[in-house]
Image: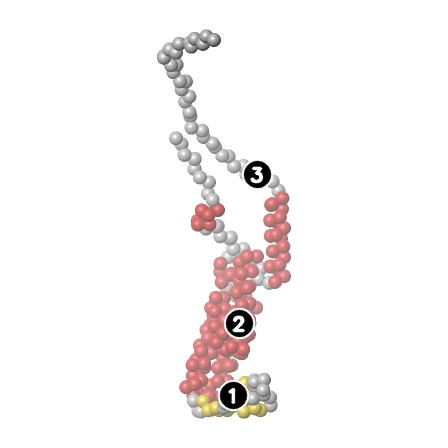
């Protein structure tokens, strides 16, 4: 008996994986950076090196730093802090070894950002900027914005072929319009399904050879 081939279900398609959407631009363009991105990356690297320069004096001698905290609701400070100008502050002495890890971190990542910008490597600049932004906290917000900005522009290039907001928005509208037109137009593809039926042979029952005599009617 022939067995019909099963049609691929949604689960089997998901297991095989959906076909990847082709990039609108070559891979080298997505992974590289343009003139504007390169200039901003150089500025970010220069800022990182400037921050390392500001920290460098602390590497040669002991220095005093001031820590500040917000006072509690009762306008009081924790132990070791003194209330000054509506802020809790304290002055502490630091050793050069306390500043060395942060100095090396900013210096190395800043040099890496400059180097990757020189080589036009988007991934290197973005990762370095995000790492430095997370390490510096509030001071590192510009680096976080730079890393996120580079990643967003790469996604726009890959999907729409234009890294700018205006250009990618126009391409998105055109693609949405083309998809709507495809849905409205009748499909030209026809699917043929063959259904096979198993042959069934009907055999007539043989006549019974047994003789049954007629019954006599009863006399009343």
In the image, is residue 201 above or below residue 210? below
Q: The residue tagged with tag 3: helix, strand or loop?
A: loop
Residue found at the far front of this picture? 220
Provide the residue designation for mark 2. Answer: 144
Q: The residue tagged with tag 1: helix, strand or loop?
A: loop
17 or 196: which is nearer to us? Answer: 196
Q: Mark 3 or 1 closer to N-term?
A: 1
Near mark 2 (Cα within 10 A), the count class, few <14, some 14-19 or many ≥20, is many
Q: Which residue is drawn at 48% across and 46% down?
A: 10
In the image, is residue 126 above or below residue 75? above
| Image location (x, y in percent) of residue 90 | 51, 90
Please give the count of numbered marks on the rendered protein.
Answer: 3
Q: Mark 2 or 3 closer to N-term?
A: 2
Near mark 1 (Cα within 10 A), the count class, few <14, some 14-19 or many ≥20, is few
67 or 98: which is nearer to us? Answer: 67
90 or 64: which is nearer to us? Answer: 90
87 on left or right of 100 = right
CA separation, marks 1 and 2?
Answer: 33 Å
Q: Mark 1 or 2 closer to N-term?
A: 1
| Image location (x, y in percent) of residue 190 | 54, 37
User: Residue 104 — which label?
Assistant: none
Quadrant housing the N terminus: top left
Near mark 3 (Cα within 10 A), the count class, few <14, some 14-19 or many ≥20, is few
Provide the residue designation for mark 3. Answer: 188
CA separation, marks 2 and 3?
Answer: 49 Å
Provide the residue designation for mark 1. Answer: 78
Residue 204 makes an appearance in the image: yes
CA separation, marks 3 and 1?
Answer: 77 Å
| Image location (x, y in percent) of residue 37 | 55, 68
Q: Which residue is drawn at 60% across and 52% down?
A: 175
Q: Residue at x 54, y 88 (%)?
A: 77
33 or 205: which is nearer to us? Answer: 205
């Amino acid at each position: 008996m022939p067995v019909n081939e099963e049609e691929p279900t949604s689960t089997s398609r998901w297991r095989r994986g959906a076909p990847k959407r082709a990039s609108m631009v070559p891979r080298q363009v997505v992974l590289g950076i343009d003139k504007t991105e390169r200039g901003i990356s150089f500025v970010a690297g220069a800022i990182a090196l400037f921050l390392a320069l500001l920290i460098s004096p602390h590497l040669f001698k002991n220095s005093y730093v001031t820590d500040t905290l917000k006072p509690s609701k009762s306008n009081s400070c924790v132990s070791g802090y003194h209330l000054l100008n509506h802020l809790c502050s304290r002055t502490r002495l630091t050793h050069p070894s306390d500043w060395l890890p942060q100095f090396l971190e900013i210096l190395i990542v800043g040099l890496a950002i400059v180097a990757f910008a020189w080589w036009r490597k988007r991934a290197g600049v973005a990762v370095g900027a995000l790492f430095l932004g997370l390490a510096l906290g509030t001071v590192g917000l510009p680096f976080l914005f730079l890393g996120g900005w580079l990643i967003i522009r790469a996604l726009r290039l890959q999907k729409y072929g234009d890294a700018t907001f205006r250009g990618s928005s126009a391409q998105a509208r055109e693609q949405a319009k083309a998809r709507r037109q495809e849905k409205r137009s009748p499909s030209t593809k026809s699917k043929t399904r063959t259904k096979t039926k198993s042959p069934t042979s009907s055999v007539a029952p043989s006549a019974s050879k047994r003789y049954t005599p007629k019954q006599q009617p009863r006399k009343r």
